[in-house]
Image (cartoon, helix red, strand yellow):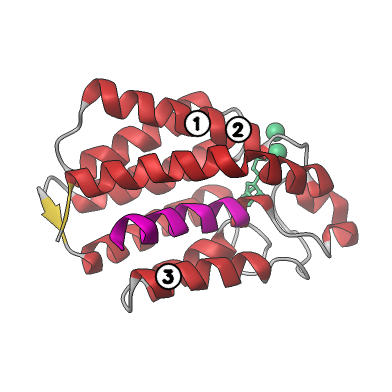
């Protein structure tokens, strides 16, 4: 079972990964966006770790909803409300259970992903974060390692895609040949999950 501390460690590991890879995320966003994805994610996850220290949420669901709220309120870019919705909706799905199973987490993430798709109007193949998140959530029923591999593969698979949502879509055909920044940060978040589960 996964307890509150597991979820706190996941968010902390995600913040570390985003901090480490901020330069790369911004570089990817400079090719097909406005060169701020690393900065956006870093600002958001710095606020997440600060809020988790300050408020000490006491259930897995509360860790995710608090984290989601921080992303929505601190990140100006599209990714803030989208990731914020993912975590808030997933947190809500976990309810106030003190411990949850990996299967419950998978179910909760799929609910969060559906909310992201509804908010942003994107679907698989549109070259967005969903291209990493959807296969990862599906693979989570198998194992954390399978989810990580699926997210990383999903992020790589965005390279030949034509962007149909977000800023990259303004580039049309010129978006082809570049990895999507949001799919890349999603792979980091899932890799952080696999790290804390190991
Ligand atoms: P902005 O584009 O506002 O500067 P970011 O650079 O932080 O925001 O985030 C860009 C990422 O957000 C993209 O790489 C993509 O993965 C994701 N994204 C943008 N629009 C959507 C959408 N409508 N649905 C899902 N993901 C999206
Ligand atoms: Mg951007
Ligand atoms: Mg921006």
Q: Nearer the viewer, residue 155 or 166?
A: 155
Residue behind mark 3: 147
Q: Which mark is residue 40?
A: 2
Quadrant location of residue 77? top right
Which image quadrant is residue 2 in? bottom left
Direction from residue 65 to residue 38 in the image, left or right: right
Name the secondary structure under disc 2: helix
Tell whether 27 sits left or right of 149: right
Residue at position x 77%, y 50% from top?
A: 168
> Residue 155: image x %, image y %?
62, 64
Give the crowd class for mark 3: few <14, some 14-19, many >=20 residues within 10 Å: many
Q: Mark 1 packing: few (<14 Cα in 10 Å), some, or many (20+)?
A: many
Residue extending furthest right?
Answer: 174
Residue named by callout 1 = 44
Mark 3 CB lies closer than 8 A to ligand 1:
no
Could you give the CA–CA distance between mark 2 and mark 1, rounded to whole angstroms?
A: 6 Å
Q: Quadrant of the N terminus?
A: bottom left
Q: Please, what is the dominant secondary structure of the magenta stretch?
A: helix
Residue at position x 18%, y 64% from top? 101
Secondary-structure class at tag 1:
helix
Q: Magenta residues, as a range? A: 184-198
Judging from the image, what secondary structure is the residue with disc 3 in? Answer: helix
Q: Residue 11, labelled with which disc?
A: none
Residue pictured at 54% horizontal, 27% vertical? 43
């Amino acid at each position: 079972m996964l307890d509150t501390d597991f979820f706190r460690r996941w968010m902390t590991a995600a913040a570390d990964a985003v901090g480490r890879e901020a330069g790369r995320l911004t570089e990817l966003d400079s090719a097909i966006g406005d060169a701020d994805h690393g900065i956006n994610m870093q600002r958001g996850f710095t606020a997440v770790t600060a809020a988790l220290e300050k408020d000490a949420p006491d259930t897995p669901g509360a860790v995710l909803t608090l984290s989601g709220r921080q992303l929505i309120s601190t990140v100006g870019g599209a990714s803030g409300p989208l990731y914020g919705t993912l975590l808030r909706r997933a947190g809500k799905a976990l309810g106030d259970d003190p411990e949850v199973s990996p299967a419950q987490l998978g179910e909760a993430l799929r609910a969060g992903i559906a909310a992201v798709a509804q908010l942003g109007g994107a679907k698989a193949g549109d070259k967005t974060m969903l291209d990493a998140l959807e296969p990862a959530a599906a693979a989570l029923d198998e194992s954390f390692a399978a989810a990580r591999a699926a997210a990383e593969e999903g992020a790589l698979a965005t390279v030949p895609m034509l962007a149909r949502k977000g800023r990259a879509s303004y580039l049309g055909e010129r978006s082809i040949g570049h990895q999507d920044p949001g799919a890349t940060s999603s792979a980091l978040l899932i890799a952080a999950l696999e790290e804390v589960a190991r």
